[in-house]
């Protein structure tokens, strides 16, 4: 899970821009990733246009499964973290 968080934190500047610009597709993909109630099949429908290659699909399955394996408390904390990053000074200029 720590590795997943590192990848997520590395992508946050892109997410800040997307969220600040009103990119609903990015916001939806992040929300679906963090939501533990979303199955892998449902998740594939959300992100299928972003995973054209077979190894992309495998990586996305593993990434999503990491979130599905977490407790509700952990998922709530991830949501708090994402919101804190969106509200940070670094993202406020977007």
Image: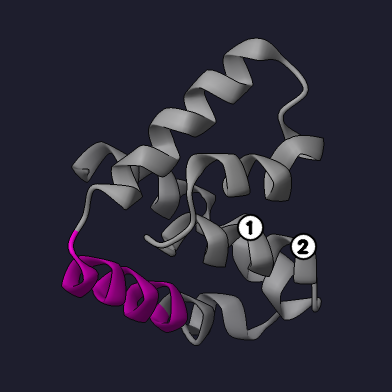
User: Where residue 78 sits in the image (x, y, percent)?
Assistant: 32, 68
Q: Who is closer to the viewer here, 36 or 52? A: 36
Disc 2 to disc 1: CB gap under 8 Å: yes
Q: To which residue does mark 2 refer?
A: 25
Magenta range: 71-84
In the current view of this chain or complex, which residue is farthest to the top? 54
Residue ID at (51%, 20%): 58
In the rendered structure, the answer to whether residue 35 lies left or right of residue 86 reads left
> Toward which corner of the image does residue 13 lie, by quadrant?
bottom right
Give the Cα separation between the discs numbered 2 and 1: 6 Å
> Mark 2 falls on what kind of element?
helix
- Split into 4 quadrants, where in the image is the N terminus? top left
Instruction: Rate crowding at label 1 as few (under 14), some (14 to 19) or many (20 or more) other CA atoms within 10 Å.
Output: some
Instruction: Rate crowding at label 2 as few (under 14), some (14 to 19) or many (20 or more) other CA atoms within 10 Å.
Output: few
Q: Who is closer to the viewer here, 6 or 52? A: 52
Q: To which residue does mark 1 refer?
A: 29
In the rendered structure, the answer to whether residue 50 lies left or right of residue 72 reads right
Residue ID at (59%, 13%): 55
- Split into 4 quadrants, where in the image is the C terminus? bottom right
């Amino acid at each position: 899970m720590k590795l997943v968080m590192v990848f997520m934190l590395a992508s946050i500047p892109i997410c800040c821009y997307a969220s600040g610009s009103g990119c609903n597709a990015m916001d939806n993909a992040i929300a679906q990733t963090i939501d533990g109630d979303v199955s892998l099949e449902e998740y594939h429908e959300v992100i299928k246009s972003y995973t054209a290659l077979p190894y992309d699909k495998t990586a996305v399955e593993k990434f999503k499964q990491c979130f599905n394996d977490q407790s509700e408390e952990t998922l709530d904390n991830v949501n708090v973290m994402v919101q804190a990053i969106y509200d940070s000074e670094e993202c406020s200029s977007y």
